[in-house]
Image (cartoon, rainbow, N blue to C red):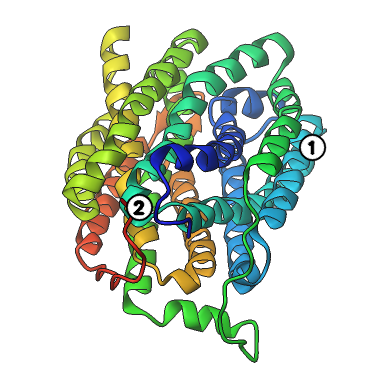
Amino acid sequence: MIPSSSTARQDAWLLWPLAAIHFYHLLDLLMLQPLAPQLMSQLALSSGQFASLVTAYALCAALGGLIAALFIDRVERKRLLLCLFALFSLMTLLCGLASDYGVLLLARGVSGLAGGMLSAMVQTLIGDLIPPERRGRATGLMMSMFSLASILGVPLALWLSELGGWRLPFVLLATLALPCALVAAWRLPRRPPMPQAELRHPLAMWGRILAPRRHRAALLFVCCGVFSGACVMPFLAIYLTQALQVSSGLLSWVYLLGGAATLLASRWVGGWSDRVGKPQAFLRLAGLSLLPITLITQLPPLPWYGLLLATTLFFLLVPCRSVPAVALVTSSVDPALRGGFLAMNASCQQLATAAGAAVAGQLVQVSEQGVSGYGYAGLLGGLATLAAMVLCLRIPPLPRTEPRTA
């Protein structure tokens, strides 16, 4: 934990290198979705095969998180973060160089393996470096990277793909890895392993992490929330372009405006959740998000302004509800087990993503006649949101063990 005399300005010097790595990670993840029509056309992929690309990443990321949970609290954090980021960026490059579906599937799988550990490391360092009463704001900054990736990265990826094909965005993204790594190496402090009793067997760490009831409730809460979004997000670009005949230019505006709305709101939501309490903030936002989840999956053909209003509302509420959710989960963990828990939490998120994408891949059918079944995916996403709202109230608070700051 950083000293209690630290200020929000000092927090920012620590957060921005993590934000840069998180932005890179999200951009790699988000680019795949709007590039889906090109990928399916040029590589002759079925909707099930495209879903497999999402699922492979998610399953391998889940495996990576479970592996990381065994040792993440026993190693120096900064060095591990930089090594994982190097592997992840190499796989981004391989995605751009992939010659066929098999190579692309392999690259996405290894990306997931590294990305699952990388995501856990970013969340762990936030917990290590930022005091509890400013963790909501810090989480809001991290979540705003999703919006920034949507605003800058996704439209740019679509534009680049029109110029040089779907490979070009991945290759250019890989070139940004070096400056991100240099900034992180310069600004982030070294974090020694957490002091804790030695366990006779590494797998005993899983049992130790799962022993507290609040840990189990938090993991199930995360699964339901992530599953909800994963039922809807992977096939959004396909539904808009093939069912509603949305042009690539208008699709860029969908992600641009949606990302801008989330970017403007997420930092405010982080501070607001610190004031009103993380559970109450999540419940209010999750309840409001049921409307766009249901609406976006059953849209009839609309004029451009109606479409942009509906999609912007979706991107505003669904990502923003994750801000208090992540802060709540991070603050519910025993500090001595934070790294291992958040690695396992990252695995649960990816398993929920894989499950949501796999189920949606079975429900959503893409053919020459159009797209069918997307409304059922939205209905399932809404039910998962309701389950997350119930579980939110069942996460017991963590006894105060971390010092408050001024």
State the image coordinates of residue 387 (x, y, percent, origin top left).
25, 58
Label 1: how many residues lie within 10 Å, few (<14), some (14-19) or many (20+)?
Answer: many
- Left or right relative to 273: residue 183: right
State the image coordinates of residue 298 (x, y, percent, origin top left).
28, 30
Above or below — where is 156 with respect to 289?
above
Label 1–label 2 contact, CB within 8 A: no
Q: Which residue is mark 2?
A: 327
State the image coordinates of residue 252 (x, y, percent, origin top left).
48, 15
- Left or right relative to 364: residue 101: right
Above or below — where is 301 with respect to 54?
above
Above or below — where is 328 with respect to 99?
below
Name which residue type carries label 2: Ala
State the image coordinates of residue 27 (x, y, percent, origin top left).
58, 32
Label 1 to label 2, Cα distance in Å? 34 Å
In which image quadrant can residue 69 be found? bottom right
Q: Which residue is mark 1?
A: 94
- Left or right relative to 110: residue 374: left
| SS label for mark 1 | helix
| SS label for mark 2 | helix
Mark 1 vs mark 2: in front: 2
Above or below — where is 198 with respect to 331?
below
Label 2: how many residues lie within 10 Å, few (<14), some (14-19) or many (20+)?
Answer: many
In which image quadrant can residue 70 be found? bottom right
Name which residue type carries label 1: Leu
Residue, x 53% and y 38% (percent of image)? 13
- 213 or 353, nearer to the observer: 213
